[in-house]
Amino acid sequence: MTGTTGKNTDNKKIQAEKEKALEQAILQLEKQFGKGAVMKLNGENIQQIPAIPTGALPLDIALGIGGLPRGRVVEIYGPESSGKTTLTLSVIAQAQKLGGKAAFIDAEHALDPSYAKKLGVQVEELLVSQPDSGEQALEIAEALVRSNALDVIVIDSVAALVPKAEIEGDMGDAHMGLQARLMSQALRKLTGAIHKTNTILIFINQIRMKIGVMFGSPETTTGGNALKFYSSVRLDIRRIESMMKGDEPIGARVRVKIVKNKVAPPFRKTAFDILFNSGISREACILDEAVKLNLVKKSGTWYSIGEEKMGQGKENARQFLVENPHLADQLEAKIREHHKVPIITANGIVQPAKATDKKTAKV
């Protein structure tokens, strides 16, 4: 027994020494590379970084800081019609609500102003550029970043950033690695300026298939590897379900996987609804999260809050929250309080959410 006790004591001492050595190493790394350079995956010590909300509450929760981080490069990629542009326009709308300014560099020449307006974007305040080449697009982005006047810049898309040499060349000419070199050079120049000006630079990207892949995913994104390395957040967005009202499609449910996150623990997955006429549904997002936390009871197809019936089916329950915005606000406050997701105000102050409503408190 004495020998076993002695061994346990020795093990505890060794473990304590290891813990102390690890703490010292982490302190040294934080001193050298900044706070948040090394973190535990349990998400307890998330670095508080200024952010702009995405407009999708489940995604803001999954991102860990209440939105997309300021002063960073963000990549959003996925298949066609998966909600990439809708998500970026929603971020622009949120930035404008906070009093910020935004620019949309439309390399695809496909921006629909009327759709952007439906999503809440103040189109008369939005700067739009439709460049002729990849070099021009990235030079415009750099000039706008260095102006220190913008909060969000979106480039749609990396695949459409065609190098000048390719535009001026003949069809069928080989231009190996031109776009990858262009992206690598641009990101080397842009990252420092983005960090200093606290601008979010969002790249929308498309998916391509690698030929001859036998094991693992054959999917890859365009523009080489530089963007993968320079991005602080990478979001993989996919359409998983169509939303129907009778026989008529009214929207789509999308799933987002946080493939990379340098500001909070990565690899989280979330889903939310996008309505065709109004974009990301705030009320549906609140409803999904409220059901998870048992703030809203779901019995069969019926939704209820306390003793009050909200409606049969998700669409009716969502409509109930649209008609009762005070209830939606109270539920959102409780959800944010539970997940410790901050409320970001117009003057940039980050406040912890507090829910004091009696009706939702007893649910």
Image: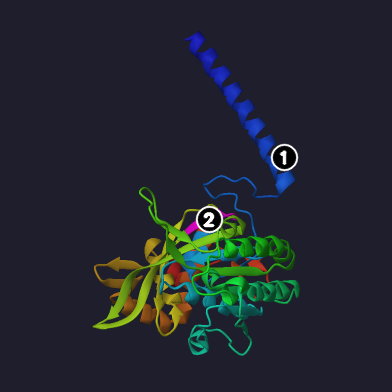
Name which quarter of the figure residue 280 lies in.
bottom left
- Pointer 1 residue: 28
Q: Magenta includes 259?
A: yes
| Residue 24 image position (x, y, % from top left) | 69, 35
Question: Please, what is the three-letter code of the amino acid marked with disc 2?
Answer: Lys
Q: Could you tell me if residue 104 is visible in this image?
A: yes
Q: Is residue 143 above or below residue 30?
A: below
Q: Which portion, as a residue range, is magenta?
A: 258-264
Q: How is the image coloured?
A: rainbow
Q: Report the disc number at residue 260.
A: 2
Q: Is residue 24 left or right of residue 155?
A: right
Q: Is residue 204 left or right of residue 243?
A: right
Packing grade of label 1 (10 A; few <14, some 14-19, many >=20) is few
Q: Quick one: SS at disc 1?
A: helix
Give whichever of 277, 172 is nearer the camera.
172
| Residue 237 image position (x, y, % from top left) | 44, 66
Q: Magenta includes 234?
A: no
Q: Earlier in the sequence, mark 2 or mark 1?
A: 1
Q: Are marks 2 and 1 in contact (CB under 8 Å)?
A: no
